[in-house]
Image: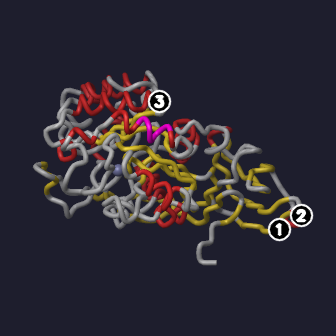
Amino acid sequence: MRYDLLIRGGTVVDPSQGLHDVRDVGLSGGKVTALEDAIPADSAKEVLDADGLIVTPGLIDLHVHAYWGVSTYGIDPDVSNLSKGVTTALDAGSAGALTFGGFRRHTLERARTRLFALLNISAMGIVSSEIGELEDSRWADVGLAVEAGAANRRYVKGIKARLGRHILGESSDIEMLKRAVGAAEGFGGFVMIHVGNSPSPLPKLMSMLRPGDVVTHSFHGFGDGVLEDSGAVVEGMKEAQGRGVVIDLGHGGGGFSFRSAEKALANGVLPDTISTDIHNVSIEGPVYDFASTLTKLMHLGMTLDEVVRRSTEIPARVLGLEGALGTLRVGAEGDVTVMREEEGRFGLVDRLSTATMMGSMAWEPGVWVEASRRLVHVHTVKGGAVYRPWL
Ligand SMILES: [Zn+2]
C-alpha cells in the first residue's frame, strides 16, 4: 500500500500554503506524503472519510497546563489536548528548575501529545493557586533556570513569568521580568509573560520584550488591559506586535474578555496566536476545548482561515518548528485535525462566573453571547495515525 492513511474529500484549510479547497491527504511513515485533488481509496491501508468536514494541520496550543498531580492546574495532556484535536502543546510554566525533572520523566516523556514546555522563572513552578510562586523572589534564580533550560533543551522552549499581583506578592514585576529575559538569553529561548492584574502598566512590560517573546492573556478583562480609556495599551500592543512580539490569546478562566477582544480587533490588533490556557479550572468552561476557543474568535469576526493560521502556522513558527508542524506540505509531520462547522444557536461565555475575588482583585462575571456557527472537533491524527485512545 502506498499510504498508511488517506483523509478523503475534506475541505483542506492550510494557510501555510494559502490553501482552502477540497483535497485528499495521504500519510505514510508518520509524515504527510501527498496532498492532491483525488487519491484512489485502494492506495491506503485506512481511509478516513472527511466529506463535508474541515481538515487542517494539527492544531498547536501555546498555553496549556499539563503537570497533573504536582501543579495545581495540571491535567493529563492527552485528555485536554490530543483528545480535543491539539497535536502539539506548550506547557506554560507548570514546572521550574527544581521540579522539572519529575515533569520530564512522568509527563513530557510519556505524553502522546507532542508536548513542549516553558520553564517557570520560579524554580518551584506553579504548585499552588493560593501562594504565588514569585512571592519570595529568591525562587526566581536565573542560574538554576539557565542550567535546567540548557539540560532539557529538547523540551524547553523558553521561560514563563507570571506577572500578576496575586503571584508576585511584594516582588517587582520589572525585576522578575528582567530575570526571565536573562534566563531565556542564557539558553537561547523565548519569554512568555502572563499579564493581568500586573503592578506595572502593560506597555512598560511589553517594551521589555524582544522579538519572538510572547504576551499571553492579551485580551483579559481586568481594569489594566485593553479596555483602558487612554488607548495606551492598544497602541503599546501595536508597537510591540510591529517589532515581532507575539500577542497570544491565552483564554483560561479569566484571561479572555469578549469586550476587550472586540475593542482590540476593532483597533486592528488581532492575536498572533490563539491558545486556550486549558487547565482543570477552565476545561469545564469557559474554555472547554480548542475548537470552542476558535469559535469565539470567529464570532468576533475573524474568518476560518484567520483562526486556523493563528493555531497552526504561526505557533509553529513561535516554537521554531515551521515547516515540520503547522502545515500539510508534503514532508511535514503527519499531524492533522478534522473539524466540523455547524450552524445553529450556540451559547459562548468568556470568563468563569463563579469566582468573585482573586487575592485582592475583584473578578467581573462572565459575558454570554450567542453564536450562529461553531467548530467542533471530530478526529485527531498524530504522527500519521488516527488517535483512538479507546483501542
Ligand atoms: Zn496559564
- Which mark is nearer the camera, 1 or 3? 3
Residue occupying image coordinates x 78% and y 68%: 46
**What's the distance in space between the residues labelled 1 and 3, CA to CA?**
41 Å
Specify the segment rendered in magenta. 146-150
User: Please, what secondary structure does the residue beneath circle 1 have?
Assistant: strand
The spot of residue 90 in percent (x, y) is: 48, 48
For residue 45, the mark is 1
Q: Nearer the viewer, residue 331 or 228?
A: 331
Mark 1–mark 3 CB contact (< 8 Å): no
- 337 lies above or below 48: above
The residue under label 1 is which amino acid type? Lys
Mark 2 or 3, nearer chain start = 2
- 151 lies above or below 40: above
- Quadrant where the N terminus sits is bottom right
The picture quadrant where one finds residue 312 is: top right
The spot of residue 262 in percent (x, y) is: 33, 41
Mark 2–mark 3 CB contact (< 8 Å): no
The residue under label 2 is which amino acid type? Met
Residue occupying image coordinates x 29% and y 38%: 140
The picture quadrant where one finds residue 3 is: bottom right
User: Please, what secondary structure does the residue beneath circle 2 have?
Assistant: loop
The spot of residue 75 in percent (x, y) is: 41, 63
For residue 212, the mark is 3
Please give left or right for residue 149 compared with residue 180 in the image. right
Mark 1 or 3, nearer chain start = 1
Mark 1–mark 2 CB contact (< 8 Å): yes
Residue annotated with mark 2? 1
